[in-house]
Amino acid sequence: MISCTTDTAVVILSYNGKPYHEAFLPLIVAESKGLYDVVLIDNASTDDTAAYVQANFPEVKLIRLPVNKGFTGGYAEGIRQIETKYLVMLSADFEVSEGWFQPLHRLMESDEKIAACQPKIRYQKQKELFEYAGAAGGYMDALGYPFCRGRIFFTIEEDLNQYNDTIECFWASGGCFFTRSELFKSFGGLDADFFAHMEEIDLCWRFKNAGYKIMACGDSTVFHVGGSVISYGSPQKIFRNYRNGLIMMIKNVPVSELLWKLPIRLNLDVVAAYRALLSGNGKEYLAIAHAHFSFFAGIFTWINKRKSAARFNQIPNKKGIYQGSMVWQYFVKGKKKFSELGEF
């Protein structure tokens, strides 16, 4: 068991991540002095990640897993061994900026009802742009489609300080996810069946169903390389995008809404699949079909997970849910930016 000297553990899950650690660990460690402990979970790497970190960053606490347990499983196994008040799950391919940590910590300390928060996330390779996975805070539409301030579907905005405020949203990015350790563990953490996509959105949804808040902090910025677990646009990404989105609905949407929302969502998926097929993208078509097959094959598992999650439910906090359809707004009405949606 690892005991921290501060009240926060910044936890980095790594599989053959040495190049990222060479580039990004120096500033992460430099910024940690007296503020947070750095814990690296080596997920059965086959390179010399563990030896490199031990030799060059002796202050980093190291957890070595003998078997690769994937993204969600690796975090689950490592976090079980950490005692701390706060956790920051920071993906290995993230570059922090000077002063990134304290605004997030102050925000968490300001209100015990805040279950999780995130900084602004920009693209490490084009730093003026927001990054796909999280941008300036995550939201949800009425049919369970996630989107962000700064990124809606295929449109990614430039950061022109338009989202520098600190606001309540619906979900926080799992790439830099600041949460309360006790709460995280009591809610069961990340759902391992998601493997590596939308698992943080599912957890935030469970937090929100229990009445907690999720926040986006505009005073902190980090940079994400992206695509290091599952590459953007790959069949694996498409499969998990569609399948995990449906699982989230089964687990978290009220029954009275699920009865009509799920059929609409399934039909929209079918439209997307045939659109891909007609445009010559057979791999996308097969990935969506595979997602539906996997979803229905595991339906009783997802229903049991719903029952398990429901024991935490209280008065749901619906802040951050857009009551319209983002598919309609984006593809039909041509609204590409968060600012074009108006108040909700």
Image (cartoon, grey):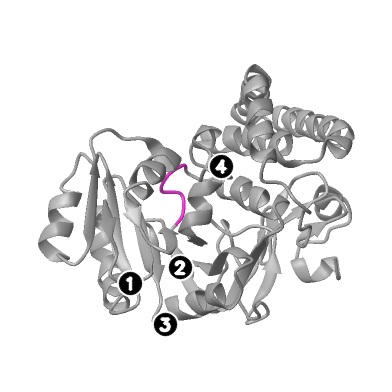
- Tag 1 residue: 6
Q: Disc 2 or 1, which lies upstream in sequence?
A: 1
- Tag 3 residue: 99
Q: Amino acid at mark 1?
A: Thr
Q: Amino acid at mark 2?
A: Phe
- Residue, x 25% and y 39% (percent of image)? 44
The circle on residue 223 is 2
Label 2 – label 1 distance at C-alpha: 24 Å
- Residue, x 40% and y 71% (percent of image)? 96
- Please, is residue 79 above or below residue 46 in the view? below
Label 1 – label 4 distance at C-alpha: 39 Å
Quadrant in the rendering for residue 224: bottom left
Label 2 – label 3 distance at C-alpha: 13 Å
Please tell me whether mark 2 or mark 4 is closer to you in this view.
2
Q: Disc 4 or 3, which lies upstream in sequence?
A: 3
Q: Amino acid at mark 4?
A: Gly
Please tell me whether mark 2 or mark 1 is closer to you in this view.
1
- Tag 4 residue: 233
Are discs 4 and 3 less than 8 Å apart at CB? no
Label 3 – label 1 distance at C-alpha: 17 Å
Q: Amino acid at mark 3?
A: Gly
Label 2 – label 4 distance at C-alpha: 20 Å
Q: Residues within 10 Å of mark 4 (few under 14, many from 20)?
A: few
Label 4 – label 3 distance at C-alpha: 33 Å
Please state the horizontal and vertical placement of residue 7, each as a whole percent of the image: 38, 70
Tell whether 225 sits left or right of 168: left
Tell whether 220 sits left or right of 203: left
Q: Residues within 10 Å of mark 1 (few under 14, many from 20)?
A: some
Q: Disc 1 or 4, which lies upstream in sequence?
A: 1
| Range covered by the magenta-colored residues | 226-230
Please indicate, yes or no, whether residue 284 appears anywhere in the rendered image: yes
